[in-house]
Image (tube, rainbow, N blue to C red):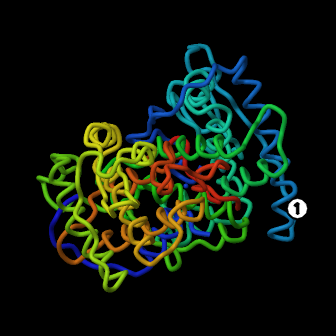
Amino acid sequence: MRARDRRLTAVAALVLVLVVLCSCTQAVPGRARAAAGASTAAVAAPHAVHASTDALGDTVTDALQNVWREDFPAAFGRPWTDVDTFAPVDTSDPDEPTPPCVRQAADLVDQAFYCPAADAVVWDAHGLLPALHDRFGPAGVAVVLAHEVGHAVQTRLGIDEAQRRDPARYPTILLEAMADCYAGVALAHLAAQPVPGLPLGPAERDAALLALVGFRDPLGVVAGDESAHGNAFDRVSAFQDGYAGDARECAGMSLDNRTFTQRHFGSEADRARGGNLPLTELLAAVEADATAWFAAVVPGWRPPPLGTGPGCRSQDLAAQGPARYCAADGRVSVDEEPLAAVHRRFGDYAGATLVVSRYALAGLHAVDAEITGPAAGAAAVCLAGAYTGRLLDRDAGFSLSPGDLDEAVQVLLEGDWAARDAAGDTDPTGSGYAAPGGGNADADGDG
């Protein structure tokens, strides 16, 4: 976070924030290359190593071919042409034959890509797939390969040729968002029509999104950069669009109807601290700004100051997590030690998201709305998204730094604190972040 002047951009940014953060109701030349900053090191619960990730790759690619044999004709009125080659590559073997579209197997370390010239999806079977499975389970492997097959969908729709004719119309970040979206379509299909050995329930869908988060662009890369592939927020929102929609929605993406949220650092000081304020400064800024916003949202209500300590004596407070709302005395407070752990692990805006969700519960209470039950938790996350939207390109005062939206994405995916109601309960069916229907991202940060 930072407090400084910034230019206001389109209201579409707010709409995009609401789509993703609310639970109310991510070779054409250069495509087969290593991605700067791409990593499989995003934090996730460990999984037992698959007996054979080669076999899992076969399961996933067979399933994806079947998905598009059905979904492509349904969406576009023409038959699907199977991807010609799926090529797992043992990048540890110096005698491995040269894979399609690269000079040597070593060029593929920790990468996956689609090469239009060979109509081939190629991946590192020694490092990338086992690492994805270890961190994210089968869903991590599925989303990465589904993204690459998403590029094959683009090829079959003529996007490669269209980009050659008009590269400004199809920048890399848009092509990656479209492929992310197609991956969302594919995983929604596989969730609705399960494949043995490829579970895609709510927990697995969150794991798939966390895998995408691991391939986001480095902080400070702007959407206009020719190498930009999307931050975590943009990639996850594109995936969700496909998951909640269909392939036609992905094909219709353009710079006219899609706003990307990547921003540069506003100052060298902001860059030096990675866009993060110290926790005490963050809490003071959030308190001042959020109370003013909620006071305007609920006329006549005076939001409480942000306190520390237990507040009212209620077991519900601890159950809500590091930030809490006490219905008995109307206080919003934080438990500083666990909130500091959230701050260290994810970044400053993760904690801010939790605090704002508790102010949201307080605002709901002020208008006599329900503050317990799944709908209350969903409304709290939705209001936190509405608040966040106004910070993206604010003219003055408290605003977002690069990475802040990604921090919100991660804390929503990896925990359910923001969606807990005033009793500390949450919807047992899942976070709702990737609600049925939604979107995609690039496995190698470049593919």
Who's the residue at 22% across and 64% down the image? 305
Left or right: where 123 falls relative to 76: left
Please state the horizontal and vertical placement of residue 389, each as a whole percent of the image.
38, 71
Please state the horizontal and vertical placement of residue 36, each as a whole percent of the image.
39, 41
SS type, badge 1: loop
Left or right: where 387 falls relative to 344: right
Who's the residue at 64% across and 65% down the image? 159
Please state the horizontal and vertical placement of residue 164, each as a whole percent of the image.
55, 65
Q: Is residue 243 above or below residue 162?
A: above
Res. 254 in view: yes
Who's the residue at 72% across and 65% down the image? 247
Who's the residue at 31% across and 85% down the image? 300
Name the foreground residue: 34 vs 425. 425
Q: Is residue 342 above or below residue 221?
A: above
Name the foreground residue: 55 vs 117. 55
Number of marks in the rendered image: 1
Q: Is residue 80 above or below residue 417?
A: below
Res. 180 in view: no
Tell me the quarter of the image containing the N terminus: bottom left
Identify the residue at the far bottom of this view.
299
Disc 1 designates what residue? 79
Left or right: where 203 falls relative to 419: right
Name the foreground residue: 319 vs 68. 319
Identify the residue at the far left of this view.
269
Q: Residues within 10 Å of mark 1 (few under 14, many from 20)?
A: some
Quarter location, residue 43: top left
Please state the horizontal and vertical placement of residue 265, each as a whole percent of the image.
22, 58
Quarter location, residue 340: top left
Amino acid type for the residue under numbered disc 1: Pro
